[in-house]
Amino acid sequence: MLIVDIINLKDIKVLLKGGGDLASGIGYRLNRAGFNLLIVEKPEPTAIRRTVSFASAIYQGQLEVEGVRGTKVKNIEEAEECWSEGSVPVITTNQKDLLSRFKPDIIIDGRMLKERTDQTIDEARLVIGIGPGFTINQNCHLAVETNRGHHLGRVIYEGSTAKNTGSPGNVNGYTDERVIHAPEAGTFQSDCQIGQKVNTGEVIGKVKNIILKTKISGVIRGLLKPGIEVKAGTKLADVDPRSEENYCYYISDKALAIAGGVLEAIFYWYNSDNMKGVS
């Protein structure tokens, strides 16, 4: 008999590190598949696709992503209430007591720290790395590729994920032109909104007194929450040249592909010899 035949998915504790748009795609699919998960984010999230990022619950208290609600919680009791309602609890990294009480069976590192990950393999029975910086049997058991192209969403069983390209994915022929970064450290300010249509050269915000303008025309798909202190190089905005406002409110194809890889990784692990003797 396979282990998944005798384990209730809701009994498997999943900790998802990160609540940005890619991690939220993972959280969405795990929730829909029947897992109880806990999302942990930094106290001041910097996700720019805020309309589809559970990280936004840290600021708003609650956020619904395609019918799945994420809720900021203060303690394990509130997290359990979320699970009973079928929603996703979201906490911050400084809630140490809650994290220590949770004791996850699975950790998914979806923070997209690229080559700077501090994840260790001994933090849970199964550690899944997302994106650059992960090597099997070193800092994760399994990993999922995030680089757009033929291998997007593929589970990595041996070796390492692809290195960070340093360039956004190609959308309608545009890559680096789509994304606006902070030219230097300071407070980001903007009067724009996600879903707003913009033309080339239009002002999208500023850092200190440096005016930031769009490089292409399209729809603002991602925009950092105004008022946040940023470092030089921080991603501030994403302009989608397809100009489909509707896309701003849906999880991306990339995030869903990665999430599918995570589900494969989990079920592979729980149906493998790795789980022999586990009850």
Image: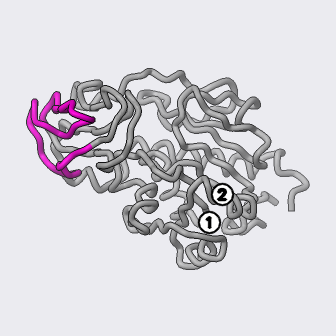
Tell me whether the residue at label 2 lies in contact with that at label 1, contact meaning CB atoms closer than 8 angstroms.
yes
37 sits left or right of 213 in the view: right
Image quadrant assignment for residue 131: top right
Measured as percent of width and height from the top left, residue 113 is found at: 54, 34
* The label number, if any, that marks residue 221 in the structure image: none
Measured as percent of width and height from the top left, residue 53 is found at: 41, 54
Q: Is residue 78 above or below residue 185?
A: below
Q: Can you identify the residue that label 2 sits on?
A: 14
Q: Can you identify the residue that label 1 sits on?
A: 36
Going by the numbered disc 1, the residue's amino acid type is Asn
Foreground residue, 53 or 207? Answer: 207
Q: Find out whether residue 203 is within the magenta segment.
A: yes
Measured as percent of width and height from the top left, residue 84 is found at: 59, 78
Range of residues picked out in magenta:
189-217
Q: Residues within 10 Å of mark 2 (few under 14, many from 20)?
A: many
Q: Is residue 10 above or below residue 117?
A: below
96 sits left or right of 19 in the view: right
Measured as percent of width and height from the top left, residue 182 is found at: 32, 31
Residue at position x 48%, y 68% from top?
Answer: 71
* Secondary structure of residue under mark 2: strand
Image quadrant assignment for residue 167: top left
